[in-house]
Each structure stands twice: as structure tokens, then as C-alpha cells.
Amino acid sequence: MELGNGATPGATPGPISQVPQVPQVQGGQQAQGGRGPAGEFGPPLPMTPPAPAWQAPTPVEQRLFEAKTRGDWVAYFDVLAESHLYHAMPRGLAEARGNGDGVTWTPFWSPAVGRHCFAFVTEGVLPAPVPDPVFFTTDLGTIADQWGTDSRWVAVNPGTPCEAYFPPNPPLWTFHADRARDVPCCTTSLRTLKVGSPLQGEVAHGLACGALLSVNNGYLWNAMAWHGHGFFRERRTLKEWWGVTSREKWHEYQNDLLSGEMASRVWEFVLEIRRALSRQYGGWVDPTLWRETAERVMRGNAAERGEDAPEPQIAGVKQLIGRITRYEARFRADGILTERGQVRSVLAWDYGRAANMARWALASRYCDLPEAEAAVRRASRVAKTDYNSWQDFAAGYVLGRCLHFDEEQFGDWYTDMLTAYRLLMESPESPWLTIPWK
């Protein structure tokens, strides 16, 4: 770990960088230091008096606020140990290092305690992404491991009602980090940002189109001003999963997703044939008729081009129709489809990924907030054009994901989506229950 401004542990800091731009806080009531295995947390700590009516952005900040109000610093540190913590870093330095090695902690002067501090913030109070600085993620145990002998203090969520300031105490932090490892972890969850992000409207609708993946990964589904897992990890994820390493490549893939060009055209071809049959005959389409019609269309198209019938392709399409019908049977058994329901299209898989792609690019600084928001709005519009309901959309998304990844194993690629689907269809706070489809 490298300290900002070229400082070494315990040294007198030089000029303080403007990163991060932390709002000034006012000194207030004296909070009593708590006790832990390493002794006193430190001297009484000046803090902003708790606001009597404060809407916490997420349960993390609410729990910190409640612990602070009680003066329960053991609980406060337990919450910190279970949470992602974010710290700002100059973008130029981050891009020069690229992979997250040698992150820099930048100190700031805190009037609240009259000393230099390192600011760490939880996810719900992150500022909107700007070109510079960027944020990286860490945790309490890592901070303890990397602290060394530096005498500067820790500022947690400065300028908020759940703020707190602490002198360095790595053994105490390690104790709480070790306790957090024993807490059962469930990644899949429906998490909502209560403050600073949309809960209704076109942007919220577009973000909800990406909610299956957000819930599966435990992301805040409606966080438009997205930092994700921090600058380094978001860039690494885009590179490893998508090959995106530049603004130009992001823009290309974002447009492909929003145009439905990423999903297999063969999948859409067979589903369009069934949609045509459904329009012609009304309602349910028998799989045998579906296969026969697909073969006849393919042979007719080949004849128009003066070519022989594409026998391997015809066999492949028939096999694909069989896969789709078996997935749909499982979807009906699990409640993703109604008793006579059939998947309309798999373009939902592209549209849902497009909403998330916009946020990944924003966290990676391949786009800015207005560009990301425009992409999410467009995801909402195209989804409404092709689908009739959240359930209709979800079935298309899950089928696309399964056809690409699952290989008819009905393994995690499917069961993870089933769990996320049920949370979104049953949880009272779900955007699928609070935001109208149209």
C-alpha cells in the first residue's frame, strides 16, 4: 500500500491533495469510546449530531447510524467489517497502474478532528462518478493489513449522519474482520438505493430491465451513478468477459446490445417463425408444426438463392427447437411461464445486459453519466417495444442466458436466474412490482 503525496507511514504529510473531495463536517457532541479486544478505540470523538429524521441510502448506512446513535462502536465496526469500503484515487495514477496494484490512499484535512485522515465511504454515500478521481474498493481487514505505523485517522462516511472518526488501531480492525468471515454470506439479494437514484420513470424502468443480473450479483439494482466494485475491478471484468478495453469498443458493444445484435440470430429466427404461426393460428403453437414450418422456410430460402437445401443447418434448427421446448417446460414447472406460455423472443437478454453494460462502462470511465443514462433509457424503450410484461421479458432473458451458457444442464446458469426471478416477482420492494411495464 502506498500513501498519498509520497508520504511514508508516520511521516508528516505534505500538501494535501484535493482527492477525495470530502464535504466538511462540523464538530459536535462528544461520543464515548467503546471497548474491544485491543482496548479503547481512542479518545472521545467529535461527530456531527445524528439527524432526527434521516433516510439512509441502504441498510448499511442505517445500521451504522443506529450503532452510532447507541454509542455501540463494537457494532459499528462489525458493520464496517461486513461492507465494501471505497477510497478515492487520482485517475491518472490509477490508469498508469492499470491492475490495482499499489493503490494510493490520499489524506485530507478534517476540521472535525483537526487532523489529517483517510476517508473511506460505504456504497450508499458514494458521489456520482466524475472523470477524476476514481474509486477503488477495499475492506476493513485489508486496511488493517496495509496500515503499517501511519498515525493519521480513519474517517468513515464524513459529512453524513453516520460518520465517525477513529485513530489507527489495526489489531482491532483485524479482530472485527475475522468475526465478519464467520457471518454467512448470500450474494443473491434484492438491494435498492433509497436516496439519490430513480425509483420510478424511464431510467428506473431501464435499470429494472437489468435487475435479474443485479439481484443475482447482489448489486443495487437502481444505482445509476455506478461505481460497482471500483475502477480496477470493473475494468478488469469488462476486459475478461467482453474484451472491452476502450471507449470505442464499449460504444460498439453497447449499440449492438441495444439493437439486439448480440443474441444469436438463429435463436431469433426460430422464435420469429413461432410468433408468425401464433399470429396466424392464434395462441399455442405445437412443436411439430413449428419444426415443419422452420424446415419449409429454410428450404424455400435456399431455393430462392439457387442453393441446395442446408441439411446440417435444418437439423441444427430442429435440435434448437427441441432445446427451447424443454427449457420452456421447465420454465412452466418453475413458474417463469404460465401453463400455456411460450417465450416471445430472447432479445431481452441483450436489453438487460445493455442496461448493466452502461453502468460497467461508467464505473470504468469509458462513458460519462449522461451517456450511461441515455443507454439505460434506450434499453427501457426497446424492451417495451418487444415485450408485454415483466414476466414476458424475464422469460426471454432467462432463455437467452441458458441457451448461451447452460447447455441444457439446468445448473447454476439457470437456477441462479430462477432465484433472482422469484425475488423480483415476490418481494414487495421489487421494481417489477412497483414500476409499471408500460
Image: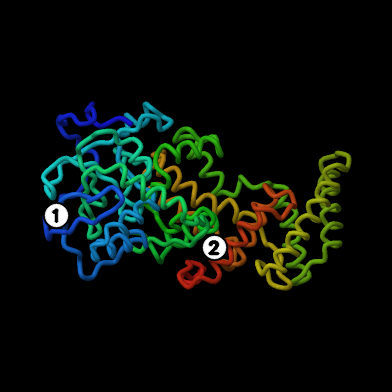
Question: Badge 1: few (under 14), some or many (20 or more) residues near its Cα, within 10 Å?
Answer: many
Q: Where does label 1 land, which residue? A: 46
**Left or right, 13 with reference to 377:** left
Disc 2 marks a residue whose amino acid type is Lys
Q: Quadrant of residue 92?
A: top left
Tell me the SS state at disc 2: helix
Q: Nearer the viewer, residue 339 or 100?
A: 100
Residue 364, visible in the rendered structure: yes
Q: What residue do we see at 22% from left, 28% from top?
A: 7
Observer-nearest of 433 and 101: 101
| Residue sitting nearer the eye, 214 or 164 | 164
**10 Å neighbourhood of mark 2: few (<14), some, or many (≥20)?**
some
Q: Position of residue 167 (x, y in %)?
A: 21, 45
Q: Nearer the viewer, mark 2 or mark 1?
A: 1
Real-space Cα separation, disc 2 to disc 1, in angstroms: 52 Å
Give the residue number, with chain letter if any, for mark 2. 384
Q: Residue at x 88, y 40 (%)?
A: 308
Q: Which amino acid, mark 1?
A: Pro
Instruction: List x then y, in percent, for residue 379.
Output: 50, 55
Depicted 238 relative to depicted 338: above or below: above
Element type where label 1 sits in the image: strand
Q: Is residue 127 left or right of residue 10?
A: right
Q: Residue shown at 36%/37% (left/top)?
A: 145
Question: Where is residue 68, by image quadrant?
Answer: bottom left
**Image quarter of the N terminus:** top left
Q: What residue do we see at 48% from left, 62% from top?
A: 190
Q: Can residue 210 be seen in the rendering of this structure?
A: no
Question: x%, y% of residue 161?
Answer: 22, 60
Q: Quadrant of residue 343?
A: bottom right
Q: Is residue 192 above or below residue 404?
A: below
Q: Evaluate if marks 2 and 1 touch, with contact meaning CB atoms under 8 Å apart.
A: no
304 and 334: which is toward the camera: 334
